[in-house]
Amino acid sequence: MGEDGNISTVNISYINFFLVGFPGLQQWRSLLVLPLTFLYVTIITANAVVIYTVVAQRSLHQPMYVLIALLLAVNICAATAVMPKMLEGFVHYANPISLPGCLAQMFFIYFTLLLDYNLLLAMALDRYVAICHPLRYSDLMTSRLLGSLAIFALTRSLGVAAPLVILTARARFCHTAVIRHFTCEYIALLSIACGDLTFNNQLGLAMRLITVTFDLVLLGTSYTRIIYAAFRISSGGARSKALHTCGSHLLVIFTIYLSGLSTSIVFRVAKTVSQDVQNLLSAIYLLLPGTLNPLIYGVRTREIRQHVGKMLCGKEPPQEVGKIPQTLQNPRVERKLPG
């Protein structure tokens, strides 16, 4: 009891919260349920179609297509970690969630985002070997290496996401039980925590900077060498295929990293930006990859596009389907690639 006879709130820590995303759209919330549900179904369907195509077609059982399928599977998991609770929040203005549920959602959000980054690194490695060392592609890009890359991606993602969740679980939430966000993001939870949060803020920022900087350096180095090697291919057709394939990967990379960078800058720098705008940027950052990736790979990757067309329309693909790696390994081309 306090000196005035009231219960002291110093040691209170809320364990149940209310997610209140987009508070400025209260009058329009019910109208957004249908288009958001359609978006979620579209994300699941589009990604699943491309994944099924890769799994069902033996000609696509190659490292590049396997990595694309894994990336799209992660997109489905990421959307599922966000969208159901987000849709519930548009039905009920105050969307209840427990602290364990909030921490679990936070973990899956950051775990899947980090898996996205790590799979993009693996895809950069695959393209580097295919274009810069085509003679050794089949010897280097083995199923054993793919398994090792998958284990590395899982371990690295877990090593970054778990500390953030553990630190958040140890914080006390005494300011309010209302989270002004549609999901349990790290910064949104810290905004209602009390006590000295300097270490939490610094760790979150340091992990993001280290991860993004490390990834961008590797990606930049890899694709610089890839583009250089591609321009040295004397065959115009092979050079065009190599650059077109890498262009799809670079488009995905720019989409993910630029949306993440803009969200981080707004959260940490632009204090005058409304909560609705911040939440909108978060929604774009979390859902844009799952929306665009199947379109980018399904439309720009000819082999996948042809097989999807066959499956949906009954159209037979041309005979050269699945020949990108073989084209890059053509002996006449290999001699002209840098060793």
Image (cartoon, rainbow, N blue to C red):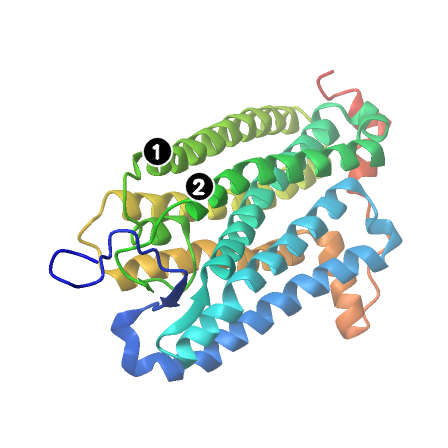
Q: What element does badge 2 sit on?
A: helix
| Residue found at x 30% / y 43% | 265
Is 187 placed above or below 211 here? below
| Tag of residue 199 | 1
- State which tag comes first along the sequence, 2 or 1: 2
| Amino acid residing under circle 2 | Leu
In this rendered view, identify the residue nearer to me: 229 or 179. 179
The answer to whether the residues at label 2 and label 1 have Cβ atoms under 8 Å apart is yes
- Residue 143 coordinates in the image, percent (x, y): 84, 36
Which corner quadrant of the image does residue 258 belong to?
A: top left
| Amino acid residing under circle 1 | Phe
- Residue 68 coordinates in the image, percent (x, y): 69, 48
User: Disc 2 versus disc 1: distance between alpha carbons?
Assistant: 9 Å
Q: What element does badge 1 sit on?
A: helix
Q: Quadrant of the N terminus?
A: bottom left
In this rendered view, identify the residue nearer to me: 45 or 226. 45
- Residue 91 coordinates in the image, percent (x, y): 42, 81
| Residue found at x 68% / y 51% | 301
In this rendered view, identify the residue nearer to me: 135 or 122. 122
In this rendered view, identify the residue nearer to me: 15 or 312. 15
Is 57 placed above or below 322 here? below
| Residue found at x 49% / y 69% | 85
- Residue 315 coordinates in the image, percent (x, y): 81, 69
Query: On the picture, is 254 further left or further right than 306?
Result: left
Name the residue carrying label 2. 167
Would residue 112 be visible to someone looking at this image? yes
Neighbours of disc 2 within 10 Å: few (<14), some (14-19), many (20+):
some
